[in-house]
């Protein structure tokens, strides 16, 4: 519990300091790259304080010059802090719209082109896909949890359709990502972080153009068994 408290205290201290350092530069230049890199350093520092080590596999084989849709299994609130910093380049993610109301954090997420999500509104969900497509056309990656929520036992839940519509509509390759170890460190419903090692495995990209429809693409991702933890 001590490590968790120290990591939380670091985050509370880091956010306003990061804003003072990065916001002026971002506003002047109109570019969020510095803000993004600074934020990722803060995230990785908080993980270290909490006793979380991260190992990667397969990242070196990815083509860094091309935007990708990273689809990751989801079992813990630690998943995004673990995965996003090790993705090969600046990445946007879908974030619950409520988080955008938090002062400083919400502003930073807007500057970094993160996409707000309203899960209760179907029309809004369609709009979210359009916003995500626009963000990726600017050269960013996108990380998505195709299950839409956390699994409590590590098994894959049914996939949402939106992420696969996004892949088919944009033609951007899907890179399945498996995260291992985060379930044990912070399962759903728990607030304490247990020290441990998380493995992030990058699988071979899947070209959506090879599939005639959404269902075939979903089946291709699931049949590889590549997101299971």
Image (spheres, rainbow, N blue to C red):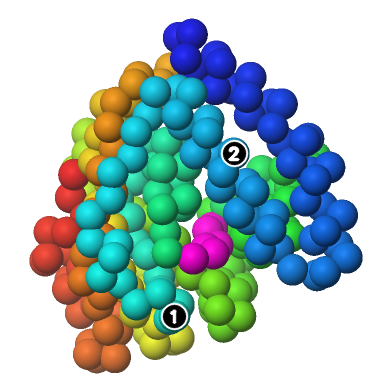
> Which mark sits nearer the N-terminus, 2 or 1?
2
Seen in the picture, residue 130 relative to 147 is either above or below; the reply is below
92 part of magenta stretch: yes
Quarter of the image that includes the C terminus: top left
Closer to us: 45 or 227? 45
On the image, numbered disc 2 is attached to which residue?
Answer: 42
Name the image quarter holding residue 128: bottom right
Residue 196 marker: none
Marks 2/1: CA–CA distance: 25 Å
139 part of magenta stretch: no
Q: Is residue 225 left or right of residue 205?
A: left
> Where is residue 163 drawn, in percent x and y?
41, 69
Seen in the picture, residue 136 relative to 196 is either above or below; the reply is below
- Mark 2 falls on what kind of element? helix
On the image, numbered disc 1 is attached to which residue?
Answer: 65
Q: Is residue 165 visible?
A: no
Mark 1 surroundings: few (<14), some (14-19) or many (≥20) residues within 10 A: few
Name the image quarter holding residue 19: top right
Q: Is residue 117 left or right of residue 191?
A: right
Closer to us: 89 or 112? 89
Q: Is residue 104 visible?
A: yes
Q: Which residues are magenta?
A: 89-94
Mark 2 surroundings: few (<14), some (14-19) or many (≥20) residues within 10 A: some
Q: Residue at x 53, y 58 (%)?
A: 93
- Chief secondary structure of the magenta portion: strand
Q: Residue at x 54, y 64 (%)?
A: 90
Q: Is residue 40 left or right of residue 227?
A: right
């Amino acid at each position: 519990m001590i490590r968790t408290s120290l990591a939380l205290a670091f985050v509370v201290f880091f956010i306003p300091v990061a804003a003072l350092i990065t916001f002026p530069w971002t506003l002047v230049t109109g570019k969020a790259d510095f803000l993004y890199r600074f934020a990722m350093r803060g995230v990785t520092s908080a993980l270290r304080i909490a006793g979380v080590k991260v190992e990667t596999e397969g990242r070196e084989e990815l083509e860094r010059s091309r935007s990708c849709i990273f689809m990751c299994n989801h079992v813990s609130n630690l998943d995004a802090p673990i995965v996003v910093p090790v993705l090969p380049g600046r990445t946007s993610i879908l974030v619950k719209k409520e988080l955008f109301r938090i002062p400083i954090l919400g502003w930073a997420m807007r500057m970094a082109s993160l996409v707000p999500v309203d899960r209760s509104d179907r029309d809004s969900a369609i709009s979210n896909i359009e916003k995500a497509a626009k963000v990726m056309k600017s050269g960013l990656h996108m990380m998505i949890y195709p299950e839409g929520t956390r699994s409590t036992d590590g098994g894959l839940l049914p996939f949402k359709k939106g992420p696969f519509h996004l892949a088919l509509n944009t033609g951007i390759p899907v890179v399945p990502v498996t995260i291992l170890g985060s379930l044990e460190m912070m399962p759903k419903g728990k607030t304490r972080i247990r020290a441990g090692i998380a493995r992030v495995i990058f699988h071979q990209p899947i070209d959506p153009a090879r599939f005639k429809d959404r269902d075939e693409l979903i089946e291709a991702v699931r049949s590889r068994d590549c997101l299971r933890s």
